[in-house]
């Protein structure tokens, strides 16, 4: 009888993608690529100026397709040999998927998808040939679309599933996040008390003493985690 693999649940943030060259707005004093964050990342901003928001995410897609998964993404895939790996990510890029991760849950949406404004369950995958959308863009069903992004002021639809994944973890790992963004930061509270927790970040936030802190960038931190898990 084949032995069941331990469940390794990952909560990844901007730090894992930063080493692939993807910029974050939290390092820019409230600006993201020189835009006020609330103008391009909020429900109010989209309602006020949808053309600007579409342009902003068009530009982000053009940048994303030039980026590649890094060693941290790749190591998560390699860990699937010995673990059932579940990735919960705050990131809207597709680097986990492009690296080959089997299970990825996006909390804040997906940059390479557009969503129907008539039916939120209808998603349309974009590609390098079709990176741009606008307020006039129509999906295959004739519906207007918007970026498939969870804006500020909107609910996080995948949080309940993320909580379920966190609660079933045999090992829980946080990578590249300040633990300041909610509800993602709350996932730690749903991990069972007997579950080992690791936190990889070069500038880690204060955490309980029971959390094993690895104060390194994502690529180096993942190398160290793999070594720890193999011992």
Image: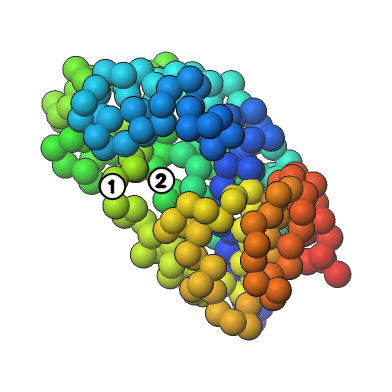
Q: Is residue 175 depicted above or below 160 in this figure?
A: above
Please give the residue where the numbered disc 2 appears in the rendered image.
108
Q: Residue at x 51, y 50 (%)?
A: 89
The residue at 21%/43% (across/down) is 120
Instruction: Please tell me the numbered disc located at residue 112.
Output: none
Q: Is residue 118 left or right of residue 26?
A: left
Residue 116: image quadrant is: top left
Q: Secondary structure at mark 1?
A: loop
Q: Is residue 130 left or right of residue 155?
A: right
Side of 207 relative to 189 (left or right): right
Q: Residue furthest front?
A: 29
Disc 1 crowd, CA 10 A, few/some/many (<14, 14-19, 20+): few
Q: Nearer the viewer, residue 181 or 13?
A: 181
The front one of 36 and 191 is 36
- Residue visible at 54% across and 68% down? 188
Colour scheme shown: rainbow
Q: Which residue is mark 1?
A: 154
Q: For numbered disc 2, what is the local secondary structure?
A: loop
Say which quadrant the N terminus sits in: bottom right
């Amino acid at each position: 009888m084949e032995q069941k693999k331990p469940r390794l649940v990952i909560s990844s943030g901007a730090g894992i993608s930063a080493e692939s060259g993807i910029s974050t707005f939290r390092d820019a004093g409230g600006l993201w690529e020189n835009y006020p964050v609330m103008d391009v990342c909020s429900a109010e901003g989209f309602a006020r100026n949808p053309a600007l928001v579409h342009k902003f995410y068009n530009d982000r897609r053009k940048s994303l397709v030039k980026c590649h998964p890094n060693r941290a993404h790749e190591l998560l895939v390699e860990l699937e040999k010995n673990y059932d790996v579940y990735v919960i990510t705050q990131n809207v890029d597709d680097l986990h998927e492009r690296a080959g991760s089997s299970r990825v849950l996006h909390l804040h949406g997906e940059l390479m998808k557009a969503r129907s404004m008539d039916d939120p369950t209808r998603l349309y995958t974009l590609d390098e040939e079709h990176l741009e959308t606008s307020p006039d863009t129509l999906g295959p069903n004739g519906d207007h679309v918007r970026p498939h992004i969870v804006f500020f002021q909107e609910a996080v639809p995948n949080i309940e599933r993320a909580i379920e994944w966190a609660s079933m973890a045999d090992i829980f790992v946080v990578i590249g996040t300040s633990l300041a963004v909610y509800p993602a930061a709350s996932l730690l509270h749903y991990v069972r008390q007997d579950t080992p927790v690791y936190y990889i970040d070069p500038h880690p936030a204060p955490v309980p003493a029971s959390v094993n802190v690895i104060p390194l960038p994502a690529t180096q931190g993942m190398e160290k985690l793999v070594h720890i898990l193999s011992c």
